[in-house]
Structures are given as C-alpha cells and as structure tokens.
Image (spheres, helix red, strand yellow):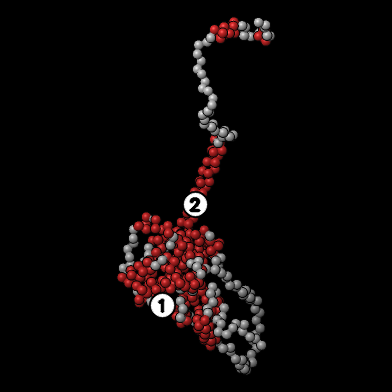
C-alpha cells in the first residue's frame, strides 16, 4: 500500500511545478494572474527559493492538480490486445542466397554542450540586463546612470564569475550590486548629476517618476522590489538587508506617500502595472555583452597597475628613508640658563711687577729637554 508523503493541499516539487505549467502552455505571468500573485512570486516558487503559504498555497496546489489531471486525460490510452487475424499460409518461395546485411548501430543522443564562462556570462547579460536597466531607472530617474550602474554590476559579476555562476540567483546578485551603485551617496558629487535629464514625455509618467524620486532611497528600493519586480516580502527584506517588519513598514509608508499624491495608484495591482508601463515607455539601451566584459577587464588591469605603482613608490620611499636616516641618537643641546650667586668674570687688566717678573722668568727658561723635568732649587 503506497501513500503520498506530501501533506494535503501541498504543491509538487519545484521542477514538477514548472513542468506542469509548460505542458499546459502557460507563461509565468498567465499562471500568476490565475493564482492572484506577481510573476516574480511564481518564478520564486518554481526555482525553490520560496514556498507558497496560506490561501495562495491552496490555490496554487489546486491549479497544479487541475493541470496534472488534464495532462493525464490527454495522454494516449494503451492499445488493447486484439486477437490476431488468421494469416494465409505462405506460399513456398524459391530459396535465394542473401548476403548478411549490417545491423544499424544505435546512435547516441547528443548531450548538452557545456558553455564557456564567456558564453554563460553573455547569456546571463542578455537575459537580465534590459530589465535591470529599466528597474534602475525607476530608482534614479536618470537613464545614463541606470545603464552605467547595470554595466558596473555585470563587470563586478565577471570579475567574480566562479562565485556568481554558483549562486542560486545570479540575477539577484547583479541586481543588488546595481542598486547599491545607483543609490550610492557619492553619485551626487559627480558632474553629470548637476545637469538634469529630460523628464518623460507623458505627464502621468512624469508625475509618477517625481513621486518616486521624492521617497527616501530605502523606501523607494523596497517599493520597486516588491511592487515592481514582484519579490516576496522576505526576499525584499533580505536584499535590502533589513528585517521583515522593517521592510513591511517601509513598503507601507512608500505606498501611502504614492497614494497621497496619486490616489488612483492606491491599489497595489494598479501600481505594479503603472511601474511596468513607466519603465517600458522609456527607450533604455544596454551595451553588448562583449563590450561589458572588455570594459571590466580593462578596469581590472588599470587597478592592478595602479596597485603595483603604489607598491613600488612605497618601497622606494621606505628605502630612501632607511638610507638617509641617522644611525645613532644625538641628544639635543639644552638651552643655557642663568646661574645666580656666581660672581661675574673680571676682565684682564695691567700686570703687576711680580707677574711681569714671573712671565719673563718663564720665557727665559728652556721649554723642552731633561732640564725641564728636574726641579731646580731657588
């Protein structure tokens, strides 16, 4: 007797979820509309990063069960064994000598071709770069800054490609890096930031973009991730490096600020649609993957050369200091101080008669020889 290990109303494993959706010829946005969630939520469910809960879980499991039943109903039934019809007796044929025919050898199915690191990076860039540029534009309101932020993020991913390639969500890794670079406070000191870019042509888009840019950076990022990208609240909190309650408070404050100025966007579904339209109406371009890879490699070479030059200059400065530095300690001469109680030195004056006689006597005596060593009586 067999039993199902999954609890009641539990969806199948992630791979089976995706297979059932693809067998029914449904896209992720279509399935998300039927369940009542964002497309990013369905993507997270199929990748196994998150698990549905509550009513969404029941609706998702019920929909997948219906798809599985429809797939089973469309499967061809096995052919029933039929009684063989009596065959006519074969007529004797003249025997012919036939040469043995070579048996066909089974051809092995070609396996998946392994991609080189450059090809895998180009595929990731082609898949995620256009959407990331549009999302970053919602954060900054600047087209060139959005493009540059995404390119810098992919260049950082190419420098750490072994780490990024093994990540469960490479696009999420690049997205977090691009958002950090785009919202860096150092961007305001760049000369480009002093010249405003032309606003969107549509008045509604212009009003929505101005409303987004008035939000604090953390609230704006949380709103774009949850209502724009379609991440769940735990994923949004993890990407913004905040707790789940803090991310929920930021999201509520951001929605209230947007609804206060644009009451028509109080509904989250309408806000999600308007954010997508605002990002899609702008003509945002992304560079080609080889150009991004070459730019990252060029920047890496420049940093390496700068580090080598700084190291050489530091070594030369240290050697010069060691060569010219004194080898022993010379204490400084202390400044002079006046001493009290000692009489001043008297300047020399005229010699007395006795001093003159003594000087003459010393001059007349022999200054060298043995006579000088022996005392002479007076």
- Residue 287 seen: no
Above or below 12: residue 134? above
Choose mark 2 or mark 1, whichever is in front. 1
Of label 2 and label 1, which has the lower sequence position? 1
User: Taking 172 as reference, is 4 above or below it?
Assistant: below
> Which residue sits at x=59%, y=34%?
328
Return the x and y of residue 32 as percentages of the image width and height: 46, 79
Q: In the rendering, at what x and y percent does residue 84 appear? A: 62, 92
Q: Secondary structure at mark 1?
A: helix
Q: How many marks?
A: 2
Q: Of residues 239 and 279, which is closer to you in this image? A: 239
Q: Label 2's element?
A: helix
| Residue closest to the eye, 121 or 132 | 132
Q: Is residue 367 above or below residue 84?
A: above
Query: Relative to 2, is 287 on the left or the right?
Result: left
Question: Can you give x and y, in whole percent of width and height, for residue 264 in the image?
Answer: 35, 77
The residue singled out by tag 2 in the image is 303
Residue 352 makes an appearance in the image: yes
Tell me what residue is drawn at x 53 percent, y 79 percent.
53
Q: Can you identify the residue that label 1 sits on?
A: 269
Please tell me which residue lies in front, 235 or 328.
328
Q: Residue at x 54, y 35 (%)?
A: 324
Left or right of 179 in this view: 199: left
Quadrant of the drawing holding the N terminus: bottom right
Mark 1 is surrounded, within 10 Å at the Cα level, by few (under 14), some (14 to 19) or many (20 or more) other residues, namely some
Name the residue rendered at 47%, 73% in the picture: 248
């Amino acid at each position: 007797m067999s039993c199902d290990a999954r609890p009641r109303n539990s969806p199948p494993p992630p791979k089976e979820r995706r297979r059932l959706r693809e067998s029914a010829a449904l896209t992720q946005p279509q399935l998300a509309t039927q369940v009542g969630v964002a497309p990013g939520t369905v993507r997270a469910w199929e990748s196994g990063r998150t698990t549905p809960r509550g009513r969404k879980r029941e609706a998702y499991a019920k929909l997948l069960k219906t798809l599985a039943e429809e797939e089973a109903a469309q499967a061809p039934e096995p052919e029933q064994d039929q009684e063989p019809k009596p065959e006519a007796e074969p007529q004797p044929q003249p025997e012919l000598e036939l040469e043995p025919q070579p048996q066909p050898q089974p051809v092995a199915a070609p396996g998946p071709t392994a991609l080189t690191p450059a090809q895998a990076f180009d595929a990731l860039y082609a898949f995620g770069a256009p959407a990331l540029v549009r999302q970053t534009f919602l954060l900054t309101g600047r087209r060139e800054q959005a493009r540059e932020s995404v390119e810098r993020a992919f260049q950082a991913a190419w420098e750490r490609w072994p780490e990024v390639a093994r990540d469960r969500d490479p696009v999420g890794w690049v997205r977090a890096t691009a958002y950090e670079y785009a919202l860096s406070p150092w961007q305001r000191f760049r000369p480009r930031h002093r010249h405003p870019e032309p606003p969107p042509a549509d008045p509604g888009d212009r009003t929505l973009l101005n409303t987004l840019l008035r939000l604090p950076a953390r609230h704006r990022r949380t709103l774009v991730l949850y209502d724009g990208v379609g991440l769940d609240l735990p994923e949004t909190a993890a990407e913004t490096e905040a707790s789940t309650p803090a991310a929920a408070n930021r999201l509520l404050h951001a929605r209230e600020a947007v609804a206060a100025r644009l009451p028509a966007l109080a509904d989250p579904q309408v806000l999600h649609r308007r954010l997508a339209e605002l990002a899609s109406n702008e003509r945002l371009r992304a560079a080609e993957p080889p150009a991004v890879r070459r730019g990252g490699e060029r920047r890496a070479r420049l940093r390496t050369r700068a580090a080598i030059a700084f190291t050489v200059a530091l070594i030369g400065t240290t050697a010069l200091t060691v060569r010219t530095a004194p080898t022993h300690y010379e204490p400084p001469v202390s400044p002079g101080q006046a001493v009290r109680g000692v009489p001043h030195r008297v300047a020399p004056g005229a010699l007395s008669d006795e001093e003159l006689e003594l000087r003459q006597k010393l001059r007349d005596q022999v200054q060298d020889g043995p006579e000088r060593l022996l005392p002479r009586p007076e």
